[in-house]
Amino acid sequence: MPSQLAELAARMDRLHEFDREPVHPDKLQGAGRFAALFAGEHIAATEFVIGAFFVLHGVTARDLLLGLLVGNLLAVLSWTFICCPIAVETRLTLYWYLRRIAGPSLTFLYNVANALLYCILAGAMISVSATAIGLGLRIPTPALTDFLPNSAAWVLLTIGLGLLFTVLAVVGFTAVSRFAGVCSPWLFMIFLAGAIATLPSLGVRPDLSNLWSVLETRVWNGRAVAGQEPFGFWQIAFFAWFANLAMHIGLSDMALFRYAKRWWYGIFSATGIFPGHYMAWICSGLMVAAVDRNLDPGRMAYHAAGLAGVLAVAIAGWTTANPTLYRAGLALQSVTPDWPRWKLTLYTGIVTSILACFPVFFVRLLDYVAIYGLVLMPIGAVVLTEHWIFPRLGIPQFQAEREKLALNWKVLLVWVGSLAVSLILPLHLFFRWLPCYLFAIALYVGLNWKRRVSQ
């Protein structure tokens, strides 16, 4: 047995993912790989929660449809014109590119924070999947007011699912995208079929003549449930834009797009965003309305699509948690350079499985997504400024690398300063990231302007 384990570890060590160097040209991937990967990742278990929350927050049907259209379009453009071009030009992960800019010490802090936030996000996905499996096992789903686990059975279920989800993430990029490509078409069809199946129970006539009236009165009726803040068009649009802020504006998806053959492959994010963050959010809104606005993803899916719906929730969590765990493992690569990526991903999965036990991460998912984006956004602003703006202004790049700095204090000041500004801005939580992003760019240019003059 020890010799077999040693052989397995040696094979895993040979799973080379270009963690510390540019991706080789012969390893670049075609458009289809990214279309499948995004489709699988963004048709996710968390869509059952997010779309349902819009109903609970009392958004109107018109504001929902228009807000999601605008916000998701802005997200796709952010991937296409900001994240993917930088990834293709550098062929590096954000974490190793940032090391040249911020120095190893600050990169250490950023990567630890990034990995922890990824673990929490993946944990929320596992929790949602657990609501589906728990339905068959008669394990009650935590309520909206439950921040802590409600039973030992829930703890055992989420840890077991989390460890199962970790296995595929350990294998690497190609396996993750293949798995997503197989599952995504089926998952989308379950979302769509389940939503259509709920229409009669909501009072929609067979000829659909009263469809819009039902949507405005029974689903997105403008009335928030007790304890939930009312949402309008702008909250929906900005949420859809920043739902993946850390990935596109924050540049974390450089880890994926460094494999892209062309800079414009970011457009393929639309294959996941519009089915997942438009249609699936609408579908889950219909499902939660059909169960009297009771936010229980497993029950919602079962009511709408039976056992197929339950299975869809479980697998959707898997396809989304996989790339999230993969990113977390990459984030920790520069923190523990002597450890192989597969081992880091395994340990990350164990931590994520424990975090998944705490329902607070999915019952407060909208707020968490906003805070998650705010925390990581300033680093994306720094990297964009360093990569594109500095060369045009004549400011030398990669100060930490050239001067062998352990910590670039200017980057730290931008990060901390932007977060401080976000805390005091008298704006809704969903709106704060954009002014803070522009502030981070301006501050970083200002702090480095003297270096331009002195050259």
Image: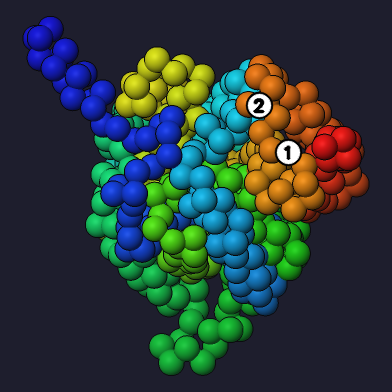
Query: In terms of depth relative to the viewer, which is nearer, 213 or 93?
Result: 93
Q: How is the image coloured?
A: rainbow
x%, y% of residue 3?
10, 9
Q: Is residue 62 shown above or below 131?
A: below
What numbered label is drawn on residue 396?
1
Q: Residues within 10 Å of mark 2 (few under 14, many from 20)?
A: few
Name the side, left or right, on which 432 lies relative to 62.
right
- Residue at 87% in and 35% down: 454
What numbered label is drawn on residue 311?
none
Q: Quadrant of the N terminus?
A: top left
Residue 135 visible from this viewpoint: no
Q: Quadrant of the C terminus?
A: top right
* Amino acid tagged 2: Arg
Q: Quadrant of residue 21?
A: top left
**Secondary element at image label 2:** helix
Q: CA distance from mark 2 to mark 1?
A: 9 Å
Query: In terms of depth relative to the viewer, which is nearer, 176 or 411?
Result: 411
- Residue at 79% in and 34% down: 414
- Residue at 34% in and 22% down: 340
What numbered label is drawn on residue 402?
2
x%, y% of residue 277?
52, 62
- Residue at 58% in and 46% down: 251
Determine whether label 2 and label 1 are within 8 Å by CB.
yes
Precedes in sequence: disc 2 or disc 1: 1
Q: Is residue 243 shown above or below 267?
A: above
